[in-house]
Image (cartoon, coloured by chain):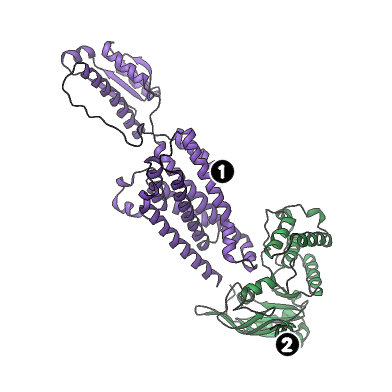
Chain colours: A green, B purple
Amino acid sequence: MNEIKDIDSEKVIVTENLTKRFGDFTAVDNISFEVKRGEIFGFLGANGAGKTTAMRMLCGLSIPTSGKGTVAGYDIFKEPEMVKKSIGYMSQRFSMYEDLKVWENLELFGGIYGMHDKEIKTKTDELMDRLNFEKERDQLVKSLPLGFKQKLAFSVSIFHHPQVVFLDEPTGGVDPITRRRFWEMIYDATASGITVFVTTHYMDEAEYCDRVSIMVDGRIEALDSPENLKKTYNAKNMDEVFQQLARKSKRKAD
Amino acid sequence: MILLLMPVIQIVLFGFALSTEVKDTQVVVLANSNDDATQRIIDRIDASEYFDVVGYVHNPKEINAAFRDGKAKLAMVFENNFSENLKTDGTAHIQLLADATDPNAATSFIFYASNIISNYQQDISTQTSSGLIQPEVKMLYNPQLKSAFNFVPGVLGMIMMLICAMMTSIAIVREKEMGTMEILLVSPMKPIYTMLSKIAPYFVLSIINFATIMMLSVFVLKVPIAGSFISLFVVSLLYIFVALSLGLLVSTITNSQLAAMMVSGMGFMIPVMLLSGMIFPIENMPGFLQVISNIVPARWYIDAVKTIMIKGLSIGDVLKDVGVLVLMGTVLVTISLKLFKVRLE
């Protein structure tokens, strides 16, 4: 068993014909892709293209209708609990407990992921130091500005050093400078061996990814590095690539 | 804090302010022949804790004025030569006038006042030893007709429902609104533990409130626990369980705190107040409302509490109530767990 996992360990996420139907509606239609360890994998698509559903399946929040998938070597059908232990997750709304202090949030989530008190304490100190958060340590999360909250939410999602972190439109509603800083944090995370799976609809952010997949109407229409995609579609930037593909959509964006 | 104080406030409110008991009601008296019999009756009225004779008036106009100014709630008019008529004819007339702006209260005034007068009548008839048959009325379980006996079980039923159902559902839906629920669900914690940990504080809170209400009712309102405290506690735990599962159900079907509050407020609180027998007796309701009242958990709980606490019977005598509550709890938990799983998929 172990050997098989070692061989596959270079591929952190593998899906084969993963499908999710809600009644007659096929939200995710036979998607197959692989994500390598340490990669930043961008998951693009218009609203309603099926990004969030696909991501929820990979996180063990939603059971696929058919297909296969493994995350961090664990089957998403058979071992959702093991999958959950190996991943981090940051949702569109940076969901922290607003009425808890910064360190209390860290302690809570560390505890939920089964970290030891000592480990939580040293990692909290280290994190506060790295983010320059010493002053804010004892503040309530709701009193922090948006950019701070976002950084904190990301830090929480990788606090237990997961193999993969899923970021669901993490940079909605913040200014370009904060976004830029946020991406620096993402790079730091990959440097420490964490694989990043990120959905976004900012096309400039797509350029920061190692590889990008573009979803249209539940299917993956294109999957490659940003450079190759631009070449293939003869486009100046990712935005043009996206426009060409998104035009095929028959679904109404919701 | 608010949740801990609420039962105290409610008990005090129901116990003193909203009491339907008559206490120190102001009475004015119109007695033109100030004779022996009138004086005795007036003394009795004044001596009772229900009434307070605040003044004597000399003509009907003054009675009207007293009512208008709110100086009196009840007026007693003795006919002229009251004592003499009583002695010679054996009958004499008293007119009772009550301020019926509050009809329930007015009825009670009249009831109490008539009681006192007929007591007096009994006394004099035994003295003259005439052969009248006098019914002797005894109020079982609640000899002083204290309303506390009725509302303590009611408040218990209401507070538990409020804390368990309403607060639990709001707390869980709040997590959904904030998005933290999603984070908790992606975490390796089993969803069922997440739910249990959300419910736990309200469970503890309900038990504290239960203890508070018990202490208040025993020590402040002097409502004794006639039956076994253990039985009472077991039944209450069961009711808390039903209320918590209701809260869980609401939290799975609603997505905003406001909706959760509306559903539990409208859907649970109002039936608890109106259909559980707490304020209006179930026997007096129209047929279809009686049927509806069967699905209100508080109805069964309040019935069980009354039986154990007031009548002093044991848990064996409330098996029907217990059975219904167990059934309700099981059904509710099953439904909400099923819905909860569906939502995940």
Q: Residue at x 44, y 46 (%)?
A: B232
List x then y, in percent, for residue A71.
67, 78
Q: Nearer the viewer, residue B76 or B101?
A: B76
Above or below — where is B115 with respect to B345? above
Where is residue B9 shown, x and y percent of the image? Answer: 52, 38
Observer-nearest of A246 and B194: B194
Q: Secondary structure at mark 2?
A: loop
Per the image, the residue denoted by label 2 is A233
Residue B261 vertical placement versus B47 (above, below): below
Q: Which residue reaches farthest bottom?
A: A232
The reply to whether residue B80 is in sight is no
**Which chain does tag 2 point to?**
A
Q: CA distance from mark 1 to mark 2?
A: 66 Å
Q: Is residue A185 left or right of residue B144?
A: right
Displayed quadrant of residue B18: top left
Mark number, residue B18: none
- At a point 50% along the width and 63% down the height, the residue shown is B253
Quadrant containing the C terminus of chain B is bottom right
Q: How many marks?
A: 2
Amino acid bearing label 1: Leu
Left or right: A37 in relation to B230: right
Q: What residue sits 35% from the left and 32% below the top?
A: B143
Which chain does the numbered disc 1 sit on? B
- State left or right for residue A38 relative to residue B208: right
Q: Residue B244 at x, y = what percent?
A: 50, 55
Residue assigned mark 1:
B4
